[in-house]
Image (cartoon, grey):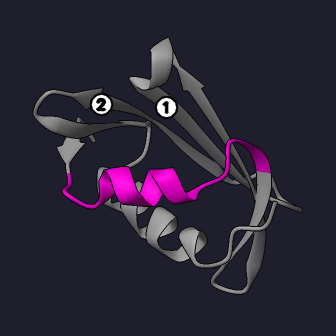
Amino acid sequence: MGESRDDGLDVLIGAIPEGWSRARVAGQTWGVTRTTRAGGKVVSFEAERLGDGEGLGANIWFTADGAVLKPCEVPAESVMEFLRSAVSTAER
């Protein structure tokens, strides 16, 4: 689980609207919350599948070396897959 660096992470998380939004991932509706902190240097991301409460989350730290993904109790690739799918379907 640990941390992960990904060149596209800053673009993906930047495409998720601040606050709460909906996203369709694999035909299912998710509630997505993005909260920016520390003057834009940290983004908290949480997603919950509506209807059954399955969820995932992560913190993204923006460092001089780029964005660093710190997933919460899920593999980093699960978060990245979710972000890739959600970005194209996010609604405000």
**In x, y percent, where is residue 84?**
45, 71
Q: Secondary structure at mark 1?
A: strand
Residue drawn at x 31%, y 60% is 77
Magenta residues?
6-20
Give 17 or 79, whichever is nearer the viewer: 17
Query: From this viewpoint, which residue is outermost toward the top?
Result: 38
Label number found at residue 12: none
Horizontally, residue 17 falls left or right of residue 85, namely right
Asked if disc 1 and disc 2 are in contact, CB closer than 8 Å, the reply is yes
Q: Secondary structure at mark 2?
A: strand
Tell me if mark 2 has few (under 14), some (14-19) or many (20+) residues whose alpha carbon lies within 10 angstroms of its own. Answer: some
Horizontally, residue 60 falls left or right of residue 89, namely left
* 16, above or below 18, in the image: below
Tell me if mark 1 has few (under 14), some (14-19) or many (20+) residues whose alpha carbon lies within 10 angstroms of its own. Answer: many
| Magenta stretch encompasses residue 17 | yes
Residue drawn at x 58%, y 78% is 88
